[in-house]
């Protein structure tokens, strides 16, 4: 009951923080798509470079987010952005690279050689091939990578409240510092629901984006 | 010996019950290979798998060596039955030697014993132990893997083997090789084997007896030759194919169709004597010439015998080919076609002349059994299953 | 990863560390850093203890649960359980810790509890999937040979699922190691103390004193799990071990 009252009282704040949370993740993952997909496509040209890039990305993702914040703040404070949403967005951007680059790379890499050959056979330029054959086939797989990135980073963004980035983590951080179970629970449930619902929505989107001819999306 | 008594399997499916095997009755004598044959979905696999209870029977009994298996516990039963499946099913986590030794280990053999056994079996399936013992299955070709599959089934020397399309996934050339190897092994091992196949040629080659299945029923159970000669109904006739007479060629040896009363001449005989023999035996073209060891070396053509003078040793023509008593008729017929001839001498293992095979002799032999179909008064061998089904 | 790649990576890393060292020495940062040496050692030990305890518990609980769920008699339960687990894995770990705190209060117990729960899910999931994906014909061959259910589980199913199980353990420990620094927030201790306090006090050196060991520890633990899985998974069913 207590919880319900608290929620109703703070509905406006909840809404604001949720929107903040969503826009931060969307901004960061959006930027990550803009960098990750081209990188993923480029590295299909060279297996050695591909391995190095994927390895570095996998190392980055291994580093705990709070440690990454801790490393980034001192660096960014030299340009006056130590605390706030900037290190949070950069961290999410970095974290999203692995799932997006890896899925783009594997999807394009795994396009059947016969398809590629057929495309070449009917006289497509490499760019046309990419645009008309390889990317459409890869879209569902790339989407799966985006989904992984988004869901993971909703969690990371919650932690980013501690570096002043805002978002739903604010409830949790206040709840902890004030030992207030109401804020704790509301924050935890809100951020969990956000992750679950987003995941579900992205699964649906992924299915929609799968070309009808392709039944099994990975 | 495997005896199956009114064995029935009914699968309960969402679309109602499916009778996969309906009162199957058959008996596989010790040391024989029985091939279960029929189109896809006719119940071969189901029948086979009821024997080692991979599929529990709905009703009916199975006897091994006269003993009712329903009283045995499943694990003991299975350890006494070798099992080979089409997908081979070698355990990827184990080396070849571990795969082969897996049953002996379960039976508690000591290490020295099962390692010796693994080596012995590898040699038996024609793979070099020093190369293969410590490899993993994914380092072997399909044919090699299936050889290991057979070796694993034989490891604890079970008297009975069940094989479900064991060579089905192997390419045709290797399949022939592995079938031949397996038959050679079986000559020594004398296992009682139930073998599922959908390939009539494989069945004719491997089987001592063939059981033809259709829609869960055992339609005909006969020796391959009888099956090909006397298909019981149109279904079996269609299944064995229009060329069933040709398929029988493989089953019959030259010995059983050769004529043992025949004429021959020696090098010292005169051509006149040759002509006398040709006429006496009613030969149209020639008579065989043998050397002192009674080995055929050539023939004297009738024209030569008529037109020339002198001895056979001076006027003979060399032989194009000969048949051995152990050759099957397929081989003999093939030689006839290759050399455009209608007869050839037949020799024993020492190369001595023992008879002659003629095209007429072959067609007569094959035709003779077909005659029986139209004269039902003749006795019919080996048709136990006919009455039962 | 190939050796060559590792070498490249280590070389780059070394070069960076060297450059950083030169820069920091010049700025006098190293001395400041050494000020935290004692704290770092003490908190690192605590940090590792938390990982081992919660990670170990998670493995001990999750594998048997995964095995049980994969048995035919639990098939119906298993399908719903997997759906719950899939949803569960999307829940942010900070939320799990927050919930643990709101029910169990502050201290090591809620921290370990939360960490264990967060690490459980990937292991249960992968154990279940790995066992379910063991090809049916292998199981048929195993039972046809006369293996009992337990013999089949230990000699055939688990070895063949081990690669997938280890992948789950690796994911789980990555989640775990990533969450342990947050455990400080609910009184669990560990290197998070230096990072969070550093952020609060706006002390960059203190932040680094926590962040650098945390990052290195995470990478080290991931490599260790990778190496263990490399040698533990039987060669014949280990996709990353090259065939001859
Ligand atoms: N587990 C099962 N559940 C339901 N029906 C089955 C099952 N196994 C086999 N069947 C059915 O039983 C029949 C015989 O199958 P099977 O013995 O596998 O045929 P074969 O080996 O001769 O191809 C088929 O109609 C098949 O669909
Ligand atoms: Mg079958």
Image: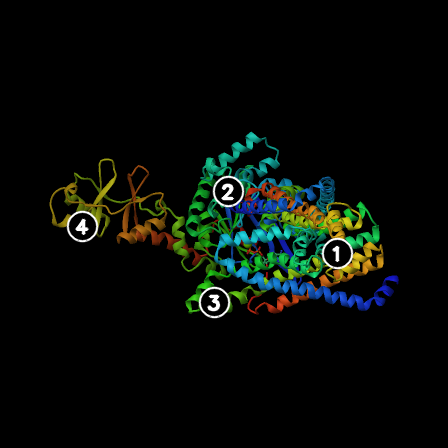
Q: Residue at x 48, y 48 (%)?
A: B142
Asked whether mark 3 lies closer than 8 Å to ligand 1, one says no
Local secondary structure at mark 4:
helix
User: Which of the two marks, 1 or 2, is nearer to us in this view?
Assistant: 1
Host chain of mark 4: B
> What is the quadrant of residue A148 in the picture?
bottom right
Side of B205 relative to A52 (left or right)? left
Q: Marks 1/2: CA distance?
A: 62 Å
Q: Chain of mark 3?
A: A
Nearer to the camera, C101 or B334: C101
Residue C47: image quadrant is top right
Q: Secondary structure at mark 3?
A: helix
Q: Same chain for labels 2 and 4? Say yes or no.
A: yes
The quarter of the image holding the C terminus of chain B is: bottom right
Estimate the x, y position of residue B152 in percent, counting from the top left: 54, 41
Residue ID for mark 4: B302
Name the chain under label 2. Answer: B
Q: Are marks 1 and 3 on the same chain?
A: yes
């Amino acid at each position: 009951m207590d919880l319900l009252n608290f929620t109703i009282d703070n509905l406006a704040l909840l809404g604001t923080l949720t929107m903040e949370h969503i826009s931060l993740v969307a901004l960061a993952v959006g930027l990550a798509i803009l960098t990750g997909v081209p990188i993923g496509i480029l590295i299909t040209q060279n297996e050695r470079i591909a391995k190095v890039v994927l390895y570095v990305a996998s190392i980055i993702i291994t580093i705990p987010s709070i440690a990454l914040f801790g490393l980034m703040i001192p660096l960014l404070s030299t340009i006056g952005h130590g605390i706030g949403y900037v290190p949070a967005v950069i961290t999410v951007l970095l974290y999203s690279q692995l799932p997006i680059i890896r899925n783009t790379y594997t999807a394009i890499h795994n396009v059947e050689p016969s398809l590629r050959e057929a495309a070449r056979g009917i006289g497509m330029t490499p760019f046309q091939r990419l645009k008309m054959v390889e990317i459409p086939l890869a879209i569902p797989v790339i989407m799966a990578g985006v989904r992984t990135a988004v869901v993971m980073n909703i969690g990371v963004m919650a932690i980013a409240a501690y570096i002043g980035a805002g978002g739903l983590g604010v409830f949790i951080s206040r709840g902890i510092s004030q030992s207030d179970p109401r804020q704790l629970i509301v924050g935890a449930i809100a951020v969990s629901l956000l992750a679950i619902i987003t995941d579900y929505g992205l699964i649906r989107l992924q299915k929609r984006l799968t070309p009808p001819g392709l039944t099994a999306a990975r | 010996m495997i005896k199956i008594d009114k064995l029935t399997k009914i699968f309960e499916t969402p679309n109602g019950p499916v009778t996969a095997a309906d009162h199957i009755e058959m008996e596989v004598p010790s040391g024989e290979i029985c091939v279960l044959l029929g189109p896809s979905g006719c119940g071969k696999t189901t029948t086979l798998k009821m024997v080692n209870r991979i599929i529990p029977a709905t009703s009916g009994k199975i006897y091994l060596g006269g003993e009712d298996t329903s009283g045995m516990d499943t694990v003991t039963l299975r350890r006494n039955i070798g099992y080979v499946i089409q997908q081979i099913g070698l355990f990827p986590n184990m080396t070849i030697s571990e795969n082969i030794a897996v049953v002996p280990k379960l039976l508690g053999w000591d290490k020295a014993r099962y390692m010796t056994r693994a080596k012995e079996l590898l040699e038996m399936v024609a793979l070099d132990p020093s190369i293969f013992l410590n490899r993993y299955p994914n380092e072997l070709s399909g044919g090699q893997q299936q050889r290991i599959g057979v070796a694993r089934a034989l490891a604890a020397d079970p008297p009975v083997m069940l094989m479900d399309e064991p060579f089905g996934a192997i390419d045709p050339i290797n399949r022939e090789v592995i079938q031949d190897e397996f038959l050679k092994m079986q000559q020594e091992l004398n296992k009682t084997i139930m073998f599922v196949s959908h390939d009539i040629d494989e069945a004719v080659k491997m089987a001592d007896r063939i059981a033809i299945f259709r829609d869960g029923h055992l339609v005909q159970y006969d020796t391959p030759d009888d099956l090909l000669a006397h298909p019981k109904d149109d279904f079996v006739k269609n299944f064995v194919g229009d060329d069933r007479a040709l398929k029988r060629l493989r089953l019959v040896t030259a010995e059983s169709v050769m004529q043992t009363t025949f004429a021959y001449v020696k090098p010292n005989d005169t051509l006149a004597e040759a002509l006398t023999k040709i006429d006496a035996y009613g030969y149209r073209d020639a008579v065989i010439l043998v050397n002192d060891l009674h080995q055929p070396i050539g023939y004297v053509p009738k024209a030569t015998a008529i037109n020339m003078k002198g001895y056979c040793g001076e006027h003979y023509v060399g032989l194009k080919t000969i048949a051995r008593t152990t050759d099957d008729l397929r081989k003999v017929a093939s030689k006839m076609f290759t050399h455009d001839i209608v007869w050839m001498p037949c020799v024993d293992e020492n190369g001595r002349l023992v008879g002659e095979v003629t095209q007429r002799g072959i067609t007569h032999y094959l035709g003779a059994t077909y005659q029986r179909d139209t004269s039902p008064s003749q006795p019919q061998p080996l048709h136990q299953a006919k009455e039962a089904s | 990863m190939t050796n060559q790649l590792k070498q490249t990576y280590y070389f780059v890393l070394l070069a960076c560390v060297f450059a950083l060292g030169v820069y920091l020495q010049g700025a006098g940062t190293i001395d400041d850093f050494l000020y935290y040496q004692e704290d770092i050692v003490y908190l690192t030990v605590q940090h590792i203890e938390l990982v081992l305890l919660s990670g170990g518990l998670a493995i001990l609980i999750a594998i048997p649960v995964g095995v049980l769920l994969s048995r035919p008699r639990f098939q119906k339960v298993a399908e719903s359980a997997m759906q719950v687990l899939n949803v569960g894995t999307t829940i942010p770990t900070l939320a799990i810790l927050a919930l643990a705190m709101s029910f169990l209060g502050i201290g090591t117990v809620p921290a370990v509890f939360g960490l264990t729960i967060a690490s459980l899910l990937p292991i249960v999931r992968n154990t279940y999937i790995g066992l379910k994906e063991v090809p049916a014909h292998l199981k048929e061959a195993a039972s046809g040979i006369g293996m009992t259910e337990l013999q089949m589980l230990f000699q055939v199913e688990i070895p063949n699922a081990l690669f997938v199980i280890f992948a789950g353990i690796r994911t789980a420990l990555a989640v775990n190691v990533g969450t342990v620094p947050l455990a400080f927030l609910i009184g669990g201790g560990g290197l998070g103390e230096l990072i969070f306090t550093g952020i609060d006090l706006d002390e960059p050196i203190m932040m680094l004193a926590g962040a650098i060991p945390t990052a290195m520890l995470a990478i080290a633990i991931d490599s260790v799990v990778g190496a263990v899985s490399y040698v533990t998974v039987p060669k014949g069913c280990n996709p990353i071990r090259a065939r001859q």
